[in-house]
Image (cartoon, rainbow, N blue to C red):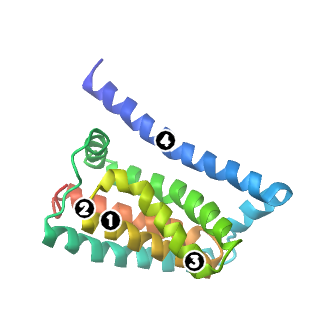
């Protein structure tokens, strides 16, 4: 098997793993919302204020990246060495790596965490606790990837707090998805351009 074939298999595994997150999110939504599932999903993607949501989400994604990149650069923080992280680094450095790493997590993680986890928790408590608990779960999912790297964990927490607040305020996923996508895209471009080292 050629190196290119191996890379294509790794890429398809990454795509499949993120798509799996989306499927899990939809299954959870359908179990939770039962007969209201279809209407709930449509509300998550309400387009009535999409331009404003994309503008706000994009602006906050840029702002988050402009905080994260200098923090990583100044502290010299690198992604911990691990097999999965090495594969991620290779994908990030590919020609279309920024699109892959920007789009996939931006969509599927937001559908799971802001489309299901946050509103599910909020059903049992208030918005502040829902944001805090969702952020803890989001951070915990990323902890194996970033281990004890304080700056990387801080960036994950900030991203989750911002996208959670966006979801609460806009009542759709557009702003949080776009913020997440823009953030990941800019950080990946900064990595490709060697502004930050991973």
Quarter of the rendering containing residue 84: top left
The residue where tag 1 is placed is 153
Please provide percent x and percent y for residue 18: 50, 46
Residue at image point 32% right, 72% down: 65
Q: State the SS at label 4.
A: helix
Foreground: 49 or 126?
126
Q: Quadrant of the N terminus?
A: top left
Q: Is residue 173 above or below residue 192?
A: below
Tell me which label, 3 or 4, sits earlier in the chain: 4
Instruction: Tell me if mark 1 has few (under 14), some (14-19) or many (20+) residues whose alpha carbon lies within 10 angstroms of its own.
Output: some
The residue where tag 2 is placed is 149
The residue where tag 3 is placed is 129
Tell me which label, 4 or 1, sits earlier in the chain: 4
Disc sitting over residue 17 in the figure:
4
Q: Is residue 26 above or below residue 151?
A: above
Residue at image point 59% right, 74% down: 130
Residue 53 appears in the picture as rendered: no
Please provide percent x and percent y for residue 67: 28, 77
- Residue furthest top in the image: 1
């Amino acid at each position: 098997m050629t190196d290119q074939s191996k890379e294509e298999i790794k890429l398809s595994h990454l795509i499949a793993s993120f798509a799996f997150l989306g499927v899990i999110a939809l299954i959870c939504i359908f179990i939770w919302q039962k007969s209201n599932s279809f209407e709930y999903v449509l509300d998550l993607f309400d387009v009535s204020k999409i331009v404003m949501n994309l503008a706000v989400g994009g602006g906050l994604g840029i702002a988050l990246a402009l905080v994260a990149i200098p923090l990583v650069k100044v502290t010299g923080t690198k992604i911990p060495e691990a097999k999965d992280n090495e594969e991620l680094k290779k994908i990030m450095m590919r020609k279309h790596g920024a699109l892959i790493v920007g789009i996939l997590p931006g969509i599927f993680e937001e559908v799971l965490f802001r489309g299901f986890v946050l509103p599910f928790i909020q059903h049992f408590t208030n918005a502040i606790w829902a944001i805090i608990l969702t952020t803890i779960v989001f951070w915990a999912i990323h902890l194996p990837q970033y281990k004890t790297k304080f700056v990387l964990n801080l960036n994950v927490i900030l991203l989750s707090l911002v996208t959670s607040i966006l979801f609460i305020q806009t009542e759709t996923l557009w702003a949080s998805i776009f913020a997440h996508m823009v953030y990941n895209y800019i950080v990946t471009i900064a990595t490709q351009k060697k502004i930050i080292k991973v």
